[in-house]
Image (cartoon, grey):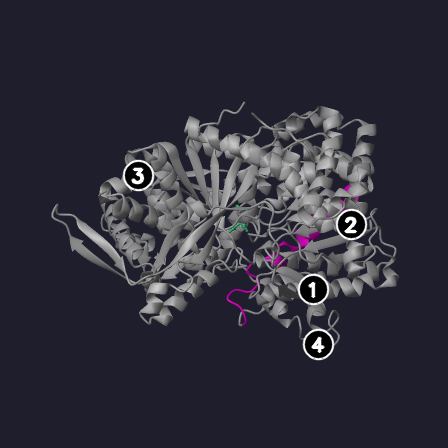
Amino acid sequence: MKRQMPSTKEIEREIQDRVKSMFRKDFEEATKEEIYRACAEVVNDVVIDNWLTTQKEFNKQDPKCVYYMSMEFLIGRLLGNNMINMRGYTEVMDALDALGIDINEIEDQEPDPALGNGGLGRLAACFLDSLATLRYPAYGCGIRYHYGMFKQKIEDGYQKEVPDDWLQTRYPFELERPEYEFEVKFGGWVRYESQPDGTTKYIHEGYNSVIATPYDMPVTGFDNGMVNTLMIWDAKPKEVFRLASFERGDYNKAVEDMNLARNLTEVLYPNDNHVQGKELRLKQQYFFVSASLQRALNKYFRYHHDIMKLPEKVVFQMNDTHPTLTVAELMRLLMDEHGLGWDDAWEVTTHCVAYTNHTIMAEALEKWPEEIFKGLLPRIYMIVEEINRRFCEEIRAKFPGDEQRIHRMAILADGQVKMAHMAIAASFSVNGVAALHTEILKNVSLHDFYEMYPEKFNNKTNGITQRRFLMHGNYKLSDWVISKIGRSWITDLSNMEKLENYLDDKKSLDEFMEIKLENKKRLAKYIWDHNKVNVDPNSIFDVQVKRLHEYKRQLLNILHVMYLYNQIKENPDMDFYPTTFIFGAKASAGYENAKLIIKLINNVAAVINNDKSIDNKLKVVFIEDYRVSNAEWIFAAADVSEQISTASKEASGTGNMKFMLNGAVTIGTMDGANVEMYNELDGENIFIFGMSSDEVIAHEKNHDYNPVDEMNNNPHIQKVLGQLINGYYSIDNPELFRPIYNSLLNTQCTERADMYFVLKDFASYCEAHEKIQAAYKDRETWAKMALSNVAHVGKFSSDRTIQEYVDDIWHLDKLELK
Ligand code: CGF
């Protein structure tokens, strides 16, 4: 039976009791952190009962389930999310209120479990939320990084990375499960023995190993009693000092195992859309894949005997190429541990694994030097060699005589192991994450593979959960929507279209704008508290928050701000609606250009915000440490959403959807899911600019773009670029921003000048902004545009995405819960 949250009165008493029993304190003496922990336990109590019930039903009903394999789960804080999903948020808020405490301060005590970089990790978290809400059995499989995404400090305008020790004190929403520990082996060599029955036995020797321990986190569904499991793996040494080796005097081996375990789960690599071929990362990949597969097979064998029927009960979805070792490790387990021959093992594997591609960026395609791979995973390497041999034969049979094609598609080529190629060769489904992205995969970046296996390719446009990004992040708008159209949108976002009935209702539009203003005031206060910049909530809040990457073109945004500033200085009386440009972005620690763009934004902010002569018409704010928790407030407060990547480069984007849900109007290129947003909006109430993806791809192919021409033809660009190198924004060091200038213009300093077509799209970006200015001036026009965005956001719920994965790829059974 589903257990409900207690009443407000009971919660009030329980919180006080918990504070007493956990900390031996009266409530009045407790710190905020202690109250947070007490609240977490009150909520956990209900969650755990539902978790137990779900798992019992799971065992009884024996449904097919998905293992979502992902190096990243950017889950964000769980207290608020669990309270919402258990339908107890208001009750806890009221209970705390009665005790004289503001719930926001309590939620603020929770560390933000930042086990991911950006879109890919947050997508995985949204998917888990939707799976549970739709009652589909699922496990998330990932890594318990001790240090997740770094905390960003801005010092003198520069990004500084500070480790985020989120596990410093016990995290209340995880449960160590030592009963599901497994050994994972690295290095050594493989000896083979011929068996009397003609088969060969492979014996792995001389390896180092660690014990993988899972920490389970509950994943709550919305108001349905369903609780799935996210298992994140940690490593510990097999024996603290590997006594056997130690006694034999092999002190080094003992220490090696210790160190291996210590390092494995220490850090998340802070790269988004870019891979560093570090051996430790490959170790992390094998570690969590091997442990997860062992646990999955272990569970399967508790209720089943016939391993050939595994695909009827289990599917492994590989979130990007990071978990591609799933293919070879499953083959190893099936053959070496469960006695299958190659053909049977391949039959099972290829019916159990599916792959999602998240990017076409060349620098994000994972390749491992064969030598490293072989040394670290000798048995896995043998299996990959055989997969490759057979795969090349298959290509040869389909395209006889085309040896170049075989070279292009091989899994092992040029001394490297190409993970995407292995993922595609073995998966029964290969999907992109937005319609345009999938078309580019089919026609350009994975064209060879599409020609080989057209039936494998499909699209699953990303989505986001409305429970976190509206109900939790923007409860005022959420309550308003409920008051207008009821609650059905909470689990079926397409119902938002009922808001269309209010598009011409002046009173409703006023209420809607009033809520936006309240949210802007909340953010303005946050900005004041954190940046000491005074921003006017009545100005346009124009926001670009996402990872910093050159293809996302924060540079285009800030160059435009510099241009506006010039305009206002030159024409002080020009008609201009005051605008606050808000940025938030982390740059990967080693990404110099990206870090310099952060510095530029901060320097421009310093100049503009201190210039009294422009009468507060322009403000620029860089929000430090952009993360899931502050993101919720930022989306809620945005008027304009900047989605301005170079067309073809952003696979989907998901921030774009979160803004839309919160009633921000998009300025964007025809890229990623923007294209589908444009379609859902019938091309209205969205500001599109810039080149199409076809145009970009054609320029890249023909090498016929010269940014110098753009500069020569546009005096505004000339002026702005001049200011990059004349000390206008860096008096002490006029050369500071020279690398940015060079990246735009100088072919000698960079592979291709202005690789992301910033200058090419500059003029049309300025024009689109002028249209925004005009539209915003009429409050009713703007309110209609913004509300229309909310009304058309239905498609972008992760509930819809998950249902498509289930229908087309996973074919899961729903769990029945009373
Ligand atoms: O995955 C991304 C994101 N940066 O994490 N890619 N990766 N890798 C894409 O660039 C986004 O466009 C996409 O929305 C996201 C999730 O699919």
**CA gap, disc 3 and disc 4:** 62 Å
Give, as a three-letter code, the residue at label 2. Glu
Residue 178 drawn above or below residue 226: below
Give the percent coordinates (x, y) of residue 679.
Answer: 60, 35
* Stretch of the chain drawn in magenta: 749-775
Q: Which numbered disc, 3 or 2, marks the residue that appears first in the sequence?
A: 2
What is the secondary structure assignment of the residue under circle 2? helix
Residue at the spot x=43%, y=26% of the render?
61
Q: Are marks 3 and 4 in contact (CB under 8 Å)?
A: no
Residue at the spot x=81%, y=61% of the render?
609
Disc number at residue 29? 2
**Residue highlighted by disc 1:** 154
Crowding at mark 4 (Cα within 10 Å: few <14, some 14-19, many 20+): few
Q: Which numbered disc, 2 or 1, marks the residue that appears first in the sequence?
A: 2
| Residue 154 lies in the magenta-colored region | no
Give the percent coordinates (x, y) of residue 253.
Answer: 36, 68
Front tag of 3 and 4:
3
What is the secondary structure assignment of the residue under circle 3? helix
